[in-house]
Structure formats: C-alpha cells, structure tokens
Image (cartoon, grey):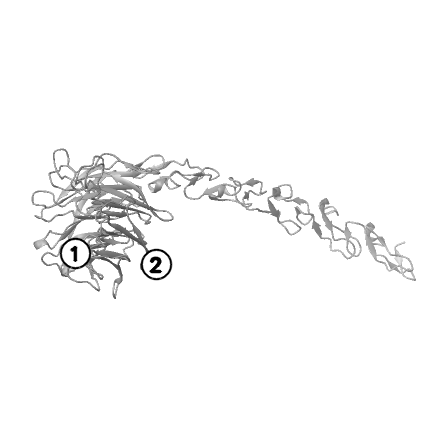
Amino acid sequence: SGYYDASCSQQCPGGGNCNAHGSCSDGASGDGTCTCDAGYFDLSCSQQCPGGGTCSGHGTCFDGTLGNGTCSCDTGYYSSDCSQQCPGGGTCSGHGTCNDGTSGDGTCTCDSGYGQSDCSQQCPGGGTCSGHGSCSDGSSGDGTCSCNSGYYSSDCSQQCPGGGTCSGHGTCDEGTSGTGACSCTGGYSGTDCSALSTLSFDSRFEFSTSHGKYGSATAMSSNGSVLVACGADAGHQSRGECTIYERSVANAYVYSQTLSDNAATKNFRFGTSLDISSSGEVLVVGSQRADLEGHVSVFLRQANGQYAFSKHLYMSTGSAGVELARYGLQVSGDGQYVVAGAPRYDSGSTDTGAVFHFRLSDSGSDEMQVIVASNKAANDFFGWNVAMSRDGEVLAVGAPGVHANDYGALYVYTRSASTEDFEGEVFLQASDKANGDKLGEGGIAISADGSVIAAGVIYRTASGQSQGGVVKVFEYSTSWSDAHTLTYTTPAASDHFGVALTMSADSLFIVACGPAINDGGTSNVGKCDAFQYGGSSYAKSGSTLVASPVSANDQYGSGVQAAAMSDDGVFFVVGAPDHASNNVGAIAIFNSV
C-alpha cells in the first residue's frame, strides 16, 4: 500500500498515504494520484482549507488535488475563512447589501432611508423624512433627518406656520430640534406673522417752497429705506423738485438730497410722477410738460448713496400736449423696464392715449413699444395711470374715459418671453359699473406677482354718498374677476376715496385715501383707511390714518401717486400737496414698527 507502477517503485505523495488526508491510486495499475478528503487540498492533500477545513461551516472550499484551498462564502459571511457574519444577522437587517465573500470587509450598503452600520435604523417619516428633508442614511449615517427650510420635528413632518415662511414676515424655529415657532419681524404679529400691526402716525415733513405742492407724488423702495417726495410746482417758475430721505437705524427718515432736472425751464413740472426700483438703485421721475410733450428723467444711485442724472427717456412719436408721465410712471423691481402713460396721445382720434414702454440700456434707443388699446376711442385717456408688477411681467393701465358713459376701464397686459413686449390684452370693468365711475382715474396698485390689482373708483356713490368713492380689487386665478369692494369707514359726499392707494407686495395689505375727507370740523384734511386680507375678504385694520397736526384743505392723498408703501406694509407715506395756505405741501409718515 502506498506504492504504484508496474515495479512498485513509486511512492504515493505525502509519505505514501496522501498525508493521511486522502487515498492514493496505488498498485501496479495506479498512477499515484491522491484523492483528498473533504477540506484538504494540494497534490499530497497536505493543506487544510480555512476554517477547520469547512470554511467555518459558512462556505464551500475549493479542495482536492486541483484546488487552491480558497473559500466561497455563503451569502452574509465574509473573511478568508468565512468566519465573520455581516451585520444585521448577515442581511444588513434586510435593508441593505453586504460586502461579503472572502475579499469582502463585511460593511453594509444600506437601502435609501436606512442608516447605522447594520442598516437597522429607518430614517424618520417613513424613511423619507416625510418628504420634507434629507436623511443621514447609509452605514456611516445615524438615521437622523435634516429638514428642508420651513419644516420641523424629528421626522420633518411639521410645516412652519404661514406656509412654512411665517407668512414671509418672520423666522421659523425649524429643523429637527425646532419648535416651529415664528419670530416675527417688526410690524407683524401672530403665530404665523400674518397680522400686520396697526399703522400709526410717526412724523411729518413740511416743505418751504411756496406753491411747491410737495407730496403730489411719492415713492418708496421695497424695504422702505429710501423715500422720495416730489413737488412738480416747486423751484423757480414751477420747474419742479424731488427730495430724498433715508431711513436711519432708529426708523426715522432724514434728509439726504434734493433732485432737479438741469434741462428744466418754466412750467417744466419735474416730479408730476415718479417711481423707484426695489433696491432703490434706479429712480425715474416724470416731467409732464418737458419739451411741451413730457419726458422721463432717469437717476442712478452712486457708491456714495447720492443719485446722479443718467438720461432722459423720450417718445419716438410724441407731440405737444401729449403729457408723457403726467401721472402714470413705473419702473420694474430690477430697474430694467419703464412704462409711462401719455393720456393725451392721439392715435387716430383725440386723446385716445397710449403707454410708452422702455427698456433701459447702456446705449442705443430705449423705447421698445407703444401700447394703445385695441378698442381705442376719442377721450379714453388710456395711460392716465399705470401700475407694473415688481417682477415687470404684468402691466395694468387705467383709461377713465372708456367709453360713452365714462365707466372707465383697466387694461391688463403680460410680458412676452420672446419679444419682451406687453401683449395679451384683457379688458376689465367693475362688475357693477355705473355711469361716471371713471375707473382708472384714481390710484392703481398691483401686487408683486401681478395677480391682484386695486383701483380707485373715486366718483362712485358709496353708502348713498355721491362721489364718496370706493376701491375695486380684481384678482386673477384662471381669469380676472372683480373680487372685492372697499369703502371708507364713514363715507361722505365728494370724499373721492381711492384717489391715492397702495398695497403691500403680497397684496394682503391695502391703504386707500380720500383727499376731501374731513377731520371733525376741519374740512378737506384728507384721511386714509388701511385694509387687511383675512383669508376670504378685506377688513379695516386699525384706526383711520390721519396726520398730526392737520389743517383745512391739506388734502392728504390728493394725487394718484401721493401714497407709497414698503413691500411688507410696515412703512407708509402719503402726501398733502395743498398743505398750508400757500400750498407748500407736506408728507406724513406712518409705520407699524
């Protein structure tokens, strides 16, 4: 035994017995090869497979004389001898894939939404942080959530009040450890910061130029840091001036600069209209009688905070008496586009009116488009007043003379993405229109996104009072609708409520003024009412706004551009161009800080 070939001269490997771990093909007819026992390998069966020859009972060994003694581990086991089980019972807790096998390191690659080394920890909120966050998943993750902005709780399932933004007027205690409580910015209160604190009188500026009529046009930057008031009859021979104020850290407005047009001549009336970009970097001022037809002056803010003249905007097809920018003038929030009404522009008939659309450029022509109503008629005065959304995408144009019965109308246009022109005309009238309404002659205000438009109907009978005036609020969903009617608290005849009006960027807050409203026994003082939207309707907010002191015939709110507001509704200004016996003019500032 243990020898082979015809002469029995050859000994089988492994001392003739395959190292006692196999059987040899011996004898005269044998070839001397070993057949190794299970778990042994090489030609002499001298090598035992890892893991006691059984791959630790968790794999299969490549044994035998042709084998190399390596293990092929069962699923869920790893290391050279298959002795190590993958975490989570070898299955990564059923929520991942293990790097197993002899070359594996036993680490788990967890399914999305599972964490920890054995993938046993599902992320909160069904593994997705409730769809409002990102999970620290994977084998190195701890299975905790990082909530998206506006969400809180361990599983990010709770949204902060006010649509997750504290109504845009506060900061939410968000995140997995947050409470969801809102910290409201100045002027706002409530659990969702939606309630604007009542506006109250803060200060008044009285001007010194006799018959300057300061305050007939006002404007305010988005955050209220810059305030501008113009007097078109100020300066020598009604050349016009504008005064700029800056808000201090103490929320007090202080004088900064006086602007005029170096090209101004007698009765130039620089300051009949104005507007300012969101950041306050671009200021546009209308001069109703410049060059007998009107033009727009553009000022740019310099590094030192002062404004410097940049250019004039002219009509390409103007004529004497057109009155470009008489009342209607707007600049987009980014300072890129300007629209100016020319209510006495003749397009086939007398005083049909037009709106001139400019794109401010560094060189070349600025005028882009001349907009006229598709149903134009004589004496429509299209362009009497205009309002453009802060994003520059929606334009509302007032035409108080439409048509035979002077109902008046608004025309709404949207900007084309390809041409940048305004197009898609929509014709709006009050659902309860009446003869002599002259919708479009009063103030017009528009929300930042262009979905809400408020317009004064200053000759409308209100609560039985002839020409008491109302404000119409139009809303856009899938189409435009006459949604709300706002009236002064105690209307009286000829109050003309709605001559001046303004709204917050989100349209939740509207302030409208009637220049002929009396204050006790003092006549034609001019007062304003504030309205706040409460989910389905507008309701009066706080007390009627009145300056202090007042005198007869101040007429606060006299002028379609006499009122302006910061985007958040916290700061409000209204002008009184007829203040004092010599009409020097004044502005009153209110805030809810």
Q: Amino acid at mark 2?
A: Ser
Quadrant where the image shows the N terminus: bottom right
The image shows a total of numbered marks equal to 2
Toward which corner of the image does residue 121 lie, by quadrant? Answer: top right
Residue 247 seen in render: no
Assign a secondary structure to mark 2.
loop
Percent from the top left, x then y, of residue 499?
20, 45
Residue type at the position of mark 1: Ser
Q: Residue at x 44, y 44 (%)?
A: 148
Above or below, comparing residue 324 to residue 443 in the picture: below
Q: Disc 1 marks which residue?
A: 287
Q: Judge by depth and name the residue closer to the eye, 287 or 373.
A: 373
Q: CA distance from mark 1 to mark 2?
A: 29 Å
Picture disc at residue 416:
2
Quadrant position of residue 281? bottom left
Give coordinates of residue 468: x percent, y percent.
20, 40
Which quadrant, please, contains the C terminus? top left
- Left or right relative to 430: residue 158: right
Q: Residues within 10 Å of mark 1 (few under 14, many from 20)?
A: many
Tell me where residue 49 appears, x and y as whole percent.
74, 50
Q: Residue furthest bottom?
A: 364
Label 1, secondary structure: give it: strand
